[in-house]
Amino acid sequence: MKNIKLKMARVEKDLTQEELADKVGVTRQTIGMIEAGNYNPTLNLCIAICKALDKTLDDLFWAEDQPEIK
Amino acid sequence: MKNIKLKMARVEKDLTQEELADKVGVTRQTIGMIEAGNYNPTLNLCIAICKALDKTLDDLFWAEDQPEIK
DNA sequence: ACAATATGTCAACTATATCTTGCATTATAA
DNA sequence: TTATAATGCAAGATATAGTTGACATATTGT
């Protein structure tokens, strides 16, 4: 399940995947996979992304119909 | 930095670390380390913990003064 | 059409989240 | 005191998050 909210928040800030990746200290591939949805990032990375985009965890990573674990 | 909010939410539900761990499918040590604070859990685990405790990510894992990454 | 930028994807590698086992410590209760 | 339950802690193993490099495919502008 793709993370549309993350992609929208990034585009809203006019950042490319690579620019966001640099800001939070990971590679662009990692950002790409998180947006693509087939990924399980760490909490600290999620928090760094939120800070970079002026959002909170609930804004970007919370959904009512959450996928199963692992 | 200890996660007091998580511990309070767990105690409020009258669950031991081990019971919560069973609910979310990890070991009690993992829960213990998250509460102790020296840990960086994955997003899916955080979400599972939130669901088990009827909380959201912001409730349990968001803080204004966030620690540095890693 | 051409060039430049942004994204998708794959394989092999490294770092670290999580597991397993075991023992020590701190409650709480009989 | 003596159990028993709950938690802390640590070493070694395994699964997976994240890196690196490379190439393909959009996409956008000239």
Image (cartoon, coloured by chain):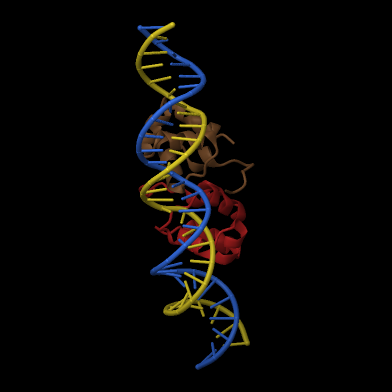
Chain colours: A red, B brown, C blue, D yellow
Residue visible at 64% across and 41% down in the picture: B65
| Residue B70 spot, x, y in % from top left | 57, 48
Using residue C16 as the reference point, say whether residue C20 is left or right of it.
Answer: left
Q: Is B57 above or below relative to D8?
A: below
Query: Image height check: is A54 above or below D3?
Result: below
User: Is residue A12 or residue C20 the one in the foreground?
Assistant: C20
How many labels were placed on the picture?
0
Whole-percent x and y of residue D16?
41, 53
Q: Is residue B34 visible?
A: yes
At 48% across and 50% down in the image, what residue appears? A61
The image quadrant that residue B13 belongs to is top left
Residue D14 in picture, x, y percent from top left: 36, 49
Identity of the residue drawn at 57% across and 52% down? A50
Residue A64: image location, x then y, percent: 41, 46
Question: Observer-nearest residue: B4 or A14?
Answer: B4
Q: Quadrant of the N terminus of chain A?
A: bottom left
Q: Is residue B8 visible?
A: no
**Residue A18 versus residue B62: which sits nearer the camera?**
A18
Q: Is residue B22 left or right of residue A55?
A: left
